[in-house]
Image (cartoon, coloured by chain):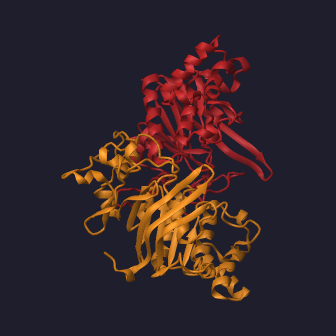
Chain colours: A red, B orange
């Protein structure tokens, strides 16, 4: 049994808005084992990015706790947090918006090293930056270039190098390839996979793209309006999706297989508002199987077969 | 092959360049496209392949300057639209050929009701009175699955998926013969995308339209299109029926696209990206533009640009490798 590196207990984040309380993340539980990848899947507004930010404490949770190697991240003081940040890093979605346009590649990649005073002289820092550039596949000649001179794939490589600079154990990858073309997307996915093997990294892989997450993850958790609706090993989830939302989501992926056309489940309507959500199951309004019991509330995740968790009163 | 009369759209040797301070952007470099009546053609390619430029040329909406249609012919039902007056062209846009743009958030006017935006099109093209046009707008909204009462609402009151439906309604209000959809679902969530694609397929069949679907998503092509053209650096590198291109892939770039996709049912299969990057359209490589990234490239590829040649009636490929007898791609199983 591998060691658990991250555990999230009853994590909640509510945002105050003019129209009421927005339940972005509403009591979720999961854990990730060291060296594994958990894919967190859902559509816009389901709370997946908020979850990623809560784990790194880039946002303060409303309730619940995040345990990194048993240590409570949510109550860590400033000094403890400083140490924790070295271990937990993030790769952002948009390589066009997440890099300071006025900093060169050297400055961008060395920034975490300088901030944490990892080396006491410039030569060592430079050496480390060069090594990181090699690791992520950036040509050394680009060291003094600026982000605007580079394409999306290379910019995302800078994002990866920055995340790796402090040799973290856990990386939250927030839609790291969504902004990239398919052929470039494949390059970055392979890079992330190789890095995981070499360095034993643990990933929380946040995405809306199910084919990417299936390729990349050991386990997949499906999120809908702030709640986890299903979690299972990825092979199991794709073979045997149980939640009506997961089923619809999987059937909605356009497939390149022209000989085996699958039955498509079309959902009614669109995601409802996360502001002051009613007691009922969050998916009830769009669910094709909705029954009276669903209006009483959403059941907790329960294990229906080994490793396969489901939150649905009907299935 | 199709005879000229069967074609709604027939593009011959289209060349479009953008003259910029940095140099000439060779966006489209000699493209031939034929779309028979009631057919749907998918145009596939990555950022900068020339997909959108091709689409805008069909409506003569290339921003000029810096864009120039350098050459070629675009026949719409037998008439070369590059030769007609702007006044006549204006009648064609929106009536005979309509376009759906990628981003539903920015292609609606925020200060007009959605009903008024649909009514504008029918008033303009069909000479209906204001009240008739408003009534038609309501009917068109119903057609895309939005209650007619909502025609008095403004775009911000609609969600992303609903806005895209409004845009589809505007495009279809005048029963166009050809609908060009430029990445119509890229900005939408996957379950909403599925709804929008179903809707477009259904309306296309009901109205008997021809369609050009521009996308980077091969899955969408497989689900919606009859034929497909794969674009790379402003040229068609492979074209044919969806079955031909998907099942007997011939061009190394098309192969690379397929190999870059994660396979849903086979987790073990490692994706194989195409090495390198799209070339800069200001400085396209000599010979075949794909040769620096091509695993099969040989001497000739660096010198001569390959022409599209046909294997069978409809399957075209532009690749020198087929000079060698018995050449075959080794597409990932």
Is residue B84 visible to us here? yes
Q: Nearer the viewer, residue A90 or A220?
A: A90
Could you say which quadrant of the image residue A106 lies in? Answer: top right
| B80 sits to left or right of A257 | right
Mark count: 0
Could you say which quadrant of the image residue A81 lies in? Answer: top right
Q: Nearer the viewer, residue A167 or A25?
A: A167
Residue B254 appears at what percent x and percent y? Answer: 37, 52
Instruction: Check the image and report above or below for B175 versus A221.
Output: below
Instruction: Check the image and report above or below for B34 versus A19.
Output: below
Is residue A291 visible to us here? no
Q: What residue sits 72% from the left and 33% below the top?
A: A60
Residue A68 appears at what percent x and percent y? Answer: 59, 24
Residue A260 appears at what percent x and percent y? Answer: 32, 59
Could you say which quadrant of the image residue A228 lies in? Answer: top right
| B223 sits to left or right of A55 | left
Q: Nearer the viewer, residue B240 or A75?
A: B240
Residue B284 appears at what percent x and percent y? Answer: 47, 49
* The N terminus of chain A, quarter of image: top left
| A253 sits to left or right of B86 | left
Q: What residue sits 27% from the left and 69% below the top?
A: B313
| A25 sits to left or right of A301 | right
Task: State the residue lying farthest toward the top.
Answer: A120
Task: State the residue lying farthest toward the right.
Answer: A18
């Amino acid at each position: 049994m591998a060691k658990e590196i991250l555990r999230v207990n009853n994590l909640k984040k509510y945002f105050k808005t003019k129209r009421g309380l927005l339940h972005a993340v509403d009591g979720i539980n999961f854990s990730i084992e060291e060296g594994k990848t958990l894919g967190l899947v859902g559509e816009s507004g389901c709370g997946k990015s908020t979850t990623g930010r809560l784990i790194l404490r880039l946002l303060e949770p409303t309730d619940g706790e995040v345990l990194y190697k048993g240590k409570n991240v949510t109550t860590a003081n400033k000094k403890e947090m400083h140490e924790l940040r070295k271990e937990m890093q993030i790769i952002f979605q948009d390589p066009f918006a997440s890099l300071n346009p006025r900093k060169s590649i050297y400055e961008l990649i060395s920034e975490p090293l300088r901030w944490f005073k990892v080396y006491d002289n410039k030569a060592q820092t430079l050496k480390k930056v060069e090594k990181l550039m090699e690791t992520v596949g950036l040509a050394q000649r680009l060291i003094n270039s600026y982000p605007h001179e580079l394409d999306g794939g290379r910019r995302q490589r800078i994002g990866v190098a920055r995340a790796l600079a402090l040799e973290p154990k856990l990386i939250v990858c927030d839609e790291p390839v969504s902004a990239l073309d398919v052929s470039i997307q494949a390059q970055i996915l392979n890079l992330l996979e190789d890095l995981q093997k070499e360095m034993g990294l643990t990933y929380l892989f946040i995405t809306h793209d199910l084919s990417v997450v299936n390729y990349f993850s050991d386990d997949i958790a499906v999120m809908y309006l702030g709640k986890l609706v299903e979690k299972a090993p990825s092979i199991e989830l794709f073979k045997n999706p149980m939640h009506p939302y997961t089923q619809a989501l999987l059937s909605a992926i356009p497939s390149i297989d022209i000989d085996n056309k699958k039955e498509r489940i079309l959902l009614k309507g669109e995601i409802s508002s996360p502001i002051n959500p009613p007691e009922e199951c969050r998916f009830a309004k769009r669910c094709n199987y909705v029954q009276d019991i669903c209006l009483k509330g959403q059941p907790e995740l329960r294990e229906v077969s080994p490793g396969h968790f489901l939150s649905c009163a009907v299935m | 092959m199709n005879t000229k009369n069967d074609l709604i759209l027939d593009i011959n040797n289209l060349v479009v360049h953008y003259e910029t301070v940095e140099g000439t952007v060779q966006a489209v470099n000699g493209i031939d496209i034929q779309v028979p009546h009631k057919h749907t053609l998918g145009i596939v390619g990555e950022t900068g392949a020339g997909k959108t430029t091709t689409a805008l040329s069909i409506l003569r909406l290339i921003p000029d300057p810096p864009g120039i249609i350098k050459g070629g012919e675009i026949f719409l039902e037998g008439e070369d639209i590059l030769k007609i007056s702007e006044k006549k062209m204006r009648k064609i846009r929106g009536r005979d050929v309509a376009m759906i743009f990628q981003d539903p958030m920015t292609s609606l006017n925020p200060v007009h009701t959605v009903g008024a935006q649909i009514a504008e099109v029918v008033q303009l093209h069909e000479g209906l009175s204001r009240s008739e046009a408003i009534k038609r707008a309501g009917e068109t909204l119903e057609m895309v699955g939005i209650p007619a009462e909502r025609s008095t609402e403004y775009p911000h009151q609609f969600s992303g998926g609903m806005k895209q439906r409004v845009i589809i309604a505007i495009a279809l209000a005048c029963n166009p013969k050809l609908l060009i959809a430029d990445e119509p679902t890229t900005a939408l969530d996957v379950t909403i995308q599925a709804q929008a694609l179903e809707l477009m397929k259904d309306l296309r069949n009901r109205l008997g339209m021809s369609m050009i679907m521009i996308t980077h998503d091969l899955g969408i092509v497989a689900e919606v299109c009859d034929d497909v053209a794969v674009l790379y650096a402003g040229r068609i590198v492979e074209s044919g029926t969806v079955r031909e291109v998907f099942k007997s892939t011939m061009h190394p770039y098309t192969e690379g696209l397929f190999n870059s996709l994660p396979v849903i049912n086979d987790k073990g299969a490692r994706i194989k990206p195409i090495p390198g990057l799209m070339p800069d359209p200001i400085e396209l490589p000599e010979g075949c533009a794909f040769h620096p990234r091509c695993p099969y490239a040989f001497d000739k590829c660096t010198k001569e640009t390959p022409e599209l040649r046909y294997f069978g009636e409809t399957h075209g490929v532009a690749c020198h490798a087929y000079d060698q007898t018995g050449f075959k791609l080794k597409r990932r199983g």
